[in-house]
Each structure stands twice: as C-alpha cells, then as structure tokens.
Image: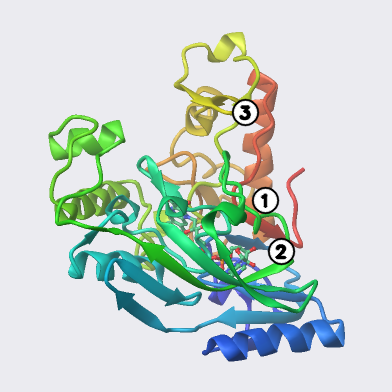
C-alpha cells in the first residue's frame, strides 16, 4: 500500500507496515506496540493534510478507522476516526448549531484538534470540550479539557509539530438551536444575502458553505482534479510590519502581529490559478479555482508537488521577503 492510495493529494510512496485500528483499544494498542518495538510510527487519519515523499515511510503507519459516535443532549462524542463532516451532519440532524460553517472539510474528527481546523471565521476548538489522548512519552491515556490543548493563533495546538500525542476521541459541545452561529465571514454573508453577525438557519449556512467550497475546489471529490490537494498548502503569514509592496493586501490583526493573505501574496507574486502547467513535468499545478491549493493533475509525484511549492514560495520570498510556511504535515520530503 502507498500513500498515494490513502491521501487526498494522491502522492507518496510505499508503507512498510500498515495497521488499521477500528476501535480505540486497538488504536492505543497498535501505537504502544510500535513504540515498545522502537519502530518509527506515523498516524494516518483521512490523509487530507499530509504530504509524504516518494520513498514512503519505513515504519508502521497506524490508520485510524474508529467509528464510535454518541450524542448526549448538546454533546457529541466521537472516536478519532469518524469523518469530521459526519459530526457536522449529526449536529444539524439533532438540532444543534455551531459547526455549520465548518461543513465540507475533509478528514477525521481526531485530525481537527491537531491544526485546529478552521474556515469561514470559526474553528473546531470553539466547540471542543474535551479530548482523550494517549501520551506516547508516559504511555498514559488522559482526558484533557479545551484549555489544556494549547489552541492559539496560526492554527496552533499542543498536538501540532509533535508526534507525542494520539487523539483517541473528542467531545464537542454545540448549541441547541436551528439557527446558525453568527455569520463572521464576508464571502459567506454575501452568499447568504445577510450582514456579518446575522444568524440564519444552520442548514442554510451549511448549504452555502458547501456551495462556496465546491466553487473553490475545497470539497474533496475523486472526480474533481482541483480537489486533489491538501487544501490550503501555505499558512497565512504573520508579520511584524507589512512590506511596502504588500500594503494593498488584506490585513488582519492577530495576537502575534499582522496576518496577511497567503493567497494574495502568491497571486501578486505572479502565480495565477492553474499555474504550473509549464513548470517541471506540468503534473502539479495551482488549483484552477484557488491559488492556495497545489493540486495533482493525475500522475504527479511528491517531488513534483514539492518542486512547485518550493518555486512558488521562492517567488513570494523574492517579491515580499516573506517565507511562507506549509500548513500541511510534510513527511520524508521538504521544500527548498
Ligand atoms: C480539499 C481540502 C480542503 C480542506 N479545507 C480545509 C479547511 O477549510 N480548513 C482546514 O483547517 N483544513 C482544511 N483542509 C486540511 C484537512 O482537511 C484538515 O487538516 C484535516 O483536519 C486533516 O485531518 P485528517 O484526518 O485527514 O488528518 P491526516 O491528513 O491523516 O493527518 C494530518 C496530521 O495529523 C496527524 N493526525 C491525524 N490524526 C491524528 C490523531 N487522531 N491523533 C494525533 N495526530 C493525528 C497525522 O499524523 C498528521 O501529522 C483541507 C484539505 C483538503 C484536501
């Protein structure tokens, strides 16, 4: 089995040993066994935020395919392997509002705390109450509340940039309401024909978000090449001062500085939608709908994706002096 069969960008080489965990007990056991044997181990959820090199992974990949889901009043407890969008659909089916603006995001519920998955002005950490984790350093299984998870700016969390923790299950707490949480994102408000801060039916918000995401190639679909990606490839950079050439770009305040739009920087550095058809083998290009997604046009390798990402990053650095950081996890590959 190769990563190209298990990731949304459909690149990446062979896996030495693949273990599929279908219960939380199996997940904990598989990780403990790999750790006891001293085998390199990589967790795999939906593979939607992972770029693995063409040589693959010489160790054990634990694929999280756990399925438990329980609804208790306004709380939904899910095993890590449950599809995130199923959590959203279940919430709406039970008259719970909150996650509707996070509709259509690929991947697992267990993957959401890792990079505090977010879109359209909200993120999963707003709704996360507790998370059960396996600490690979101590071997203990613990329940952490939201405050302990280290959610902060720039999609940060205690689980990012470390392999120490395994998310085993997550409990979300939503609001009992047929009406959505206040709409916070201009493009979404425009689509719904409302003002920022307004609430409409939560189902209407879900439908509008899915439509917007589909327009942008941000709903994963095997039949849509623009969605063969990891979503946004780069994070929006946070800078201390805005470069003169970027003074006209969208700017957002952030506790750590000024957040700029990576998409704006990429576009204004000369990389248009679909860019890449004449770069390298032409098999990896920017999405034809969104410059922030790097897409596999059919037979790209991880090396093709890395070459294009490095080229785009160098172009942005040359024009603005800003080095973009990948949002996805890179394994056995790196940008120049
Ligand atoms: C078309 C498309 C659109 C996207 N849109 C968005 C978006 O709008 N907003 C957004 O934030 N993201 C978006 N993404 C990125 C992606 O959907 C999220 O990052 C998602 O949460 C990844 O979950 P996953 O299960 O696929 O994780 P994987 O890709 O399988 O893993 C990602 C990382 O998390 C680790 N990991 C996975 N599961 C666990 C676990 N249970 N415990 C500990 N570590 C774990 C893995 O080891 C790896 O390091 C998009 C991706 C695609 C392809």
Q: Residue at x 84, y 86 (%)?
A: 36
- Label 1, residues with CA under 10 Å away: few <14, some 14-19, many ≥20: many
Q: Residue at x 50, y 39 (%)?
A: 275
Give the foreground label among 3 and 1: 3
Q: Residue at x 61, y 47 (%)?
A: 156
Q: Would you identify the image quadrant in which residue 133 lies?
A: bottom right
Write down the residue under mark 3.
Answer: 256
Which quarter of the rendering shows the C terminus? Answer: top right
* Residue extending furthest toward the top: 244
Q: Is residue 125 above or below residue 83?
A: above
Q: CA distance from mark 3 to mark 1?
A: 28 Å
Write down the residue under mark 1.
Answer: 306
Circles 2 and 1: CB atoms closer than 8 Å: yes
Q: Position of residue 186 (x, y in %)?
A: 28, 31
Q: Is residue 11 above or below residue 149?
A: below
Q: Image check: 57 left or right of 251?
A: right
Q: CA distance from mark 2 to mark 1?
A: 9 Å
Please, what secondary structure does the residue beneath circle 3 have?
loop
Q: Indicate which disc, 3 or 2, sits on the residue closer to the N terminus.
A: 2
Label 2 within 8 A of ligand 1 by Cβ: no
Which quarter of the rendering shows the N terminus? Answer: bottom right
Q: Is residue 203 above or below residue 40?
A: above
């Amino acid at each position: 089995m190769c990563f190209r069969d298990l990731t949304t960008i459909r690149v990446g080489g062979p896996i030495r040993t693949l273990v599929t965990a279908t219960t939380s007990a199996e997940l904990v056991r598989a990780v403990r066994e790999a750790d006891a044997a001293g085998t390199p181990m990589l967790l795999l959820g939906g593979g939607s935020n992972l770029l693995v090199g063409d040589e693959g992974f010489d160790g054990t990949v634990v694929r999280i395919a756990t399925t438990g889901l329980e609804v208790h009043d306004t709380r939904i407890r899910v095993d890590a392997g449950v599809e995130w969008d199923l959590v959203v659909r279940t919430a709406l089916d039970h008259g719970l509002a909150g996650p509707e603006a996070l509709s259509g995001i690929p991947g697992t519920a267990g993957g959401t705390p890792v990079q505090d998955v977010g879109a359209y002005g909200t993120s999963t950490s707003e709704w996360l109450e507790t998370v059960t984790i396996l600490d690979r350093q101590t071997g203990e299984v613990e329940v952490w509340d939201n405050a302990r998870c280290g959610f902060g700016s720039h999609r940060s969390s205690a689980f990012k940039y470390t392999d120490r923790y395994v998310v085993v299950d997550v409990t979300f707490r939503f609001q009992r309401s047929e009406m959505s949480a206040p709409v916070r994102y201009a493009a979404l408000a425009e689509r719904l024909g409302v003002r920022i801060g307004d609430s409409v039916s939560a189902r209407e918000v879900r439908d509008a978000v899915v439509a917007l995401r589909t327009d942008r190639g941000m709903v994963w679909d095997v039949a849509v090449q623009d969605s063969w990606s990891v979503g946004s490839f780069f994070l929006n950079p946070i800078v201390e001062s805005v470069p003169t050439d970027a003074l006209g770009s969208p700017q957002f305040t952030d506790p750590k500085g000024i957040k700029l739009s990576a998409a704006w920087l990429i576009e204004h550095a000369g990389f248009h939608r679909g860019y890449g058809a004449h770069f390298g083998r032409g098999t990896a290009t920017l999405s034809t709908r969104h410059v922030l997604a790097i897409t596999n046009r059919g037979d790209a390798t991880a090396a093709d994706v890395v070459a294009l990402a490095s080229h785009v990053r160098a172009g942005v650095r040359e024009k603005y002096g800003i080095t973009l950081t990948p949002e996805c996890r890179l394994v056995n590959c790196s940008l120049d």
